[in-house]
Image: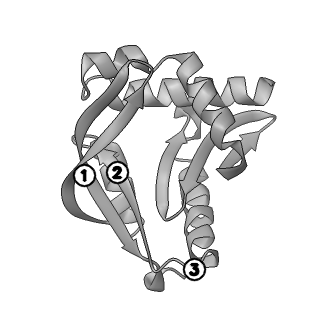
């Protein structure tokens, strides 16, 4: 499964770039390339990918009314990849009949926060996410963002 391997590497690289300095060490230890492979395999049918010359530039994973994961490779940033992925995610939420969608963003991840806010998402709360790892559960405070899908065109 070369596709899963390439996506898992994109996810790992993006996760480290965005989160390594913000999140607990025990979570960083748990977020290995293999952990990302396993999570992708379990949710592959809900993943959308933007590819250039067979190389993934970004992916989004939607779970119900949640934008669960959203990553763009460094070489895909500033190219419209993120906007294209976001447009697809919002269309999926609307198609599935949701009135509001939500996402969790690591507190301090300002690049992501700016992108979400520019795309119409509003920060509505600080909430606690329970993150499963191979070693147990880690509680992490995150910013909760929501978007009213009636505003999506």
Whether tag 1 and tag 2 are in contact, CB under 8 A, the answer is: yes
Residue 87 position in % (x across, y down): 58, 66
Element marked by disc 3: loop
- Which image quadrant is residue 134 in? top left
Q: Is residue 40 visible?
A: yes
Q: Is residue 133 above or below residue 93?
A: above
> Which numbered dot is residue 97?
3
Mark 1 to mark 2 CA distance (whole Å)? 6 Å
Q: Of label 1 and label 2, which has the lower sequence position?
A: 2
Q: Is residue 105 left or right of residue 153?
A: left
Element marked by disc 2: strand
Mark 3 to mark 1 CA distance (whole Å)? 24 Å
Q: Which residue is mark 2?
A: 104
Whether tag 2 and tag 3 are in contact, CB under 8 A, the answer is: no
Residue at x-position 46% and y-position 59%: 66
> Which numbered dot is residue 16?
none
Q: Is residue 140 left or right of residue 36?
A: left
Residue at x-position 46% and y-position 80%: 99
Residue 104 position in % (x across, y down): 34, 51
Q: Of label 3 and label 1, which has the lower sequence position?
A: 3
Element marked by disc 1: strand
Q: Nearer the viewer, mark 3 or mark 1?
A: 3
Q: Nearer the viewer, residue 81 or 142?
A: 142
Q: Of label 2 and label 3, which has the lower sequence position?
A: 3
- Which image quadrant is residue 64 in? bottom right
Residue at x-position 37% and y-position 13%: 29
Q: Which residue is mark 1?
A: 143
Report the quarter where the C terminus lies: bottom right
């Amino acid at each position: 499964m070369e596709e899963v391997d390439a996506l898992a590497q994109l996810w790992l690289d993006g996760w480290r770039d965005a989160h390594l300095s913000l999140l607990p060490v025990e979570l960083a230890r748990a977020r290995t390339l293999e952990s990302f492979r396993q999570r992708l395999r379990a949710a592959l049918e809900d993943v959308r990918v933007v590819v250039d010359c067979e190389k993934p530039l970004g992916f989004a994973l939607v779970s119900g009314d949640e934008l669960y994961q959203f990553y763009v490779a460094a070489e895909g940033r500033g190219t419209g990849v993120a906007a294209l992925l976001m447009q697809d995610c919002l269309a999926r939420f609307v198609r599935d009949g949701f009135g509001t969608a939500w996402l969790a963003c690591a507190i301090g991840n300002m690049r992501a926060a700016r992108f979400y806010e520019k795309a119409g998402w509003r920060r509505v709360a600080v909430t606690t996410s329970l993150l499963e790892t191979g070693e147990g559960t880690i509680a992490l405070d995150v910013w909760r963002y929501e978007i009213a899908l009636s505003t999506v065109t």
